[in-house]
Each structure stands twice: as structure tokens, then as C-alpha cells.
Image: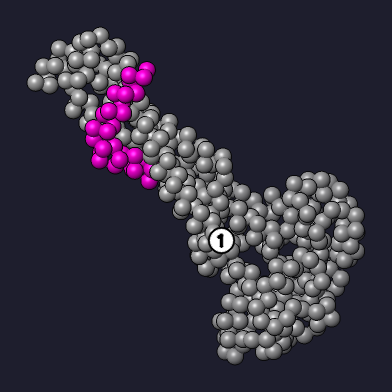
Amino acid sequence: MKQLFKMAFRDILRHKRRSIFSAVALGLGLTLLLMFASFIEGEIRGSMATSIKLDTGHIQIQAQNYDKNKSSLVWEDLIANPGQIADQISNTLPVIAATPRLFASGVVSHGNASSGVRVVGIDPVSPANDPYKNGIVAGEFLQVDDNNGVLIGKPLATQYKLKPGDSFNLLVNTSNGDVDQQQFTIRGIYSTESSGLDKAVVFLTLAKTQAITQAGDHASIIFILLKDKNQTDAVVNAIQATGLKIVPWTVLNSFIMDFQQYTDSFMSLFYLIILAITATVIINTLIMAVYERTREIGILSAIGMRSRSIMGVFFIESAILAFGGIIIGWILGGIVVAYLTRFGVYIGNFGLTGFTTGDTIHAYLTLSAGINLTALTLIVALLAAIYPAWLAARMEPVDALRNAQ
């Protein structure tokens, strides 16, 4: 075995430039695999975390007839006495917050321009609103007794050149099918670094939203954030809410989870394409080695070296190139992934429908993904050696010596 390693190293060093090129090609392939795997994982994780924090929560309590796509204000589609239910959950279960929220469709008009928005009524003191409170870039957050103030996102403020203290008209649907229009004063401008949400959502106090929409003491949902996401099932089972739906984050974010399964399938195909290209480089390198060493192979066969030993030399060469490529791949890939993890890729308002995404995607490489991709790269490199090794092993000594003349 030691002799086989010496022969393999000798051939690799005999053609240093070609060997380096092969290892670099394999390394670049692994770099791409690590980069795309971490980018997709970061996108999914980031979207899920952003969605839970800003949109769905870990758990929602809804009326049986509630449909999130309709923003219905009909009382039968809403939760009655939501504050009482939220207080009971907050006082008895391990949650960060349980707070009512009321949704309505609205139109913001300023001057001659207007745009549709989602009006969200919130309890300003709830910790669930911390992402908006901590994201204030101008002005201040809403107060509980503020019946004339509104909180708007930075993109909407930029679009209409608004600042705290300015006013605009807000047209809102009501529970009886009519519309109500009032003028509101901007108390603050927030940024969650999710442009799609910031541009489309304005906040009023829950009491004011209930009043303007004529919803009475009703809410669209009770938004629940947990201390530990792994406690979701236990909290769902512990909630006492007869006649209401209790929906966990896995269902609320089913689109993201389905998308993850789709991307996993797509990326598997993508990985195979990249590995097939890098395997072709290894195959070409070893085939060239076979034809350049025809005389040497013939002599080795003539003096009694077995075919499996000749094949072993080429497998060892492939393994050496593979390990070299893996080292290069981890160095280059590590640099790229570290950069994407630290600084991310800014996508702005470009995102997928159904996602509550941040403006910047940060990479996230899991240990299992790194190990699996490295192992897959090594396996593909060894498989690529099968044909060249078989080609060398099947040479007849006499024919090999004759052809080498």
C-alpha cells in the first residue's frame, strides 16, 4: 500500500499544473456548494424568524370563521373580549406576550396621491411591539390613550415626504360594510428593515382601531410570542379557548415550510450539476494520466502487478486531488460564507409573495450541511476515478508496451 501511495504522489507531482488545476476546480465546486447552501438556509431561517416576530407570532388565536386573506370586520369573524383572553394567557402560561390585534384595510391619501395599506390596531404597551418600538427612526411610539396618532413605516414616509407631526387622511373599512375617513397625525416613523411590510402597514392604538372600524370590543387575532419555540405544542394544548382556533407557527408559516421543501429538491439537482462538472475535470485529468503512462502501466503489469493494485493507484490519486480540493473549497468557501454571514446580501423590497423577509439576507451554514457537502464532494471525486482506473487495469501488458513505442 505504501508503494501505491508513492506512485500516486509521484504522478501528481509529475504534472503539478494539471494537478493544481484539478484540485482548484474541485475546490471551487465545493465553494459554490457551501455558498448556495448557506444562502438558502439563511433565507429560510431569516424569513421564518422575521415572519414570527413581525407577522404571525408563535401562536395565534382566531375566530372559527377568521380568514387572514379577507381582513373581515364582521363580528362573527372576530374574537370577542380579546383582552380578557390575552390577560389570562399572559398570567398563566410561559409566554413573552399575548396581545390582541385588529386588522383592517385602509387607504392613505396625502395631497393628490394615495395608496392602500393594512391598518393594524395594537396595544402599545405589549412587548410584542418591541420590534416596531425599537425600530423608531423619527418621532416616538404610540401611547395607549392616543386617539389621533398613527405610526407609519419609513418607505411610506419617504414616498410621501412625511415626517412626525405631519397629517394625512386615512380611509378605513368598517364592520357594517361602510367606510370611515379621518385625519391622523404621524407620531413616529419606524423601520423593521423589511421594506415590504414597512411600506404597507400603519399602526393605530387598538382602541382607536376598534372605534373607527366599529368593531366594538373585538380583535382579529390574539398574537402570542413564546419564550421558547419548542414549547409551542405544550402551550397550544394548555390554552383554554372554547369555540376559537388555536394555530401554531408551523401552520401560519406553511408557505415558508413548503418553499423550503421545494428549494431542498431544487438545490439537490443544482448540487449534482456542479459536482458533475467538477467530476468531469477529475476524469479528464486521470484519463490523460492513463494515456501518458501507458508504457509504465504495461511494465507494471508485465512484472506481475495486479489489476486491482493499478486501479488502487488511480483511486489514491483521485483521493489526493479530492482532499486538496476540499481544503481549497473550505478556505475559499469559509471566506465567502463568513462574509455573507456578517454582511449579508441586500435585496431591498425584492422578495417572494407570501414571505415577510428582511431587506438583507444573511447566510447560515449548518454543521450538518458542511459535513454532508464535503462527504458528497469526496464521494463524487472517488466515483470519477472508476472509469480511468478501469481503463488502466484492463490494459494488456504486450499491447500497452507496443502502443507506448
> Magenta segment range?
1-30
On the image, the x and y values in percent for residue 262 come to: 53, 46
> Could you tell me which secondary element the residue under label 1 belongs to?
loop
Direction from residue 154 to residue 4 in the image, left or right? left
Q: Nearer the viewer, residue 335 or 213?
A: 335
Tell me if residue 162 comes above or below residue 173 in the rendering: below
Q: Nearer the viewer, residue 286 or 223?
A: 286
What quarter of the picture does the C terminus occupy?
top left
What quarter of the picture does the N terminus occupy?
top left
Q: Residues within 10 Å of mark 1 (few under 14, many from 20)?
A: few
The residue at 14%/16% (across/down) is 401
Tell me if residue 398 comes above or below residue 389 in the rendering: above
Tell me if residue 4 comes above or below residue 182 in the rendering: above
Residue on which disc 1 sits: 353
Judged by its main secondary structure, the magenta piece is: helix
Direction from residue 225 to residue 403 in the image, left or right? left
Quadrant housing residue 221: bottom right
Name which residue type carries label 1.
Thr
Q: Identify the image's colour scheme: rainbow, by chain, secondary structure or one colour.
A: one colour
The residue at 58%/85% (across/down) is 160
On the image, the x and y values in percent for residue 282 come to: 31, 34
Residue 240: in magenta span? no
Q: Nearer the viewer, residue 126 or 199?
A: 126
Residue 11 visible, this orientation: yes
Q: Nearer the viewer, residue 179 or 375?
A: 375
Direction from residue 22 to residue 153 in the image, left or right? right
The residue at 52%/38% (across/down) is 371
The residue at 37%/31% (across/down) is 320
Q: Determine the residue located farthest toward the left in the rendered image.
A: 405
Residue 27: in magenta span? yes
On the image, the x and y values in percent for residue 219 come to: 81, 67
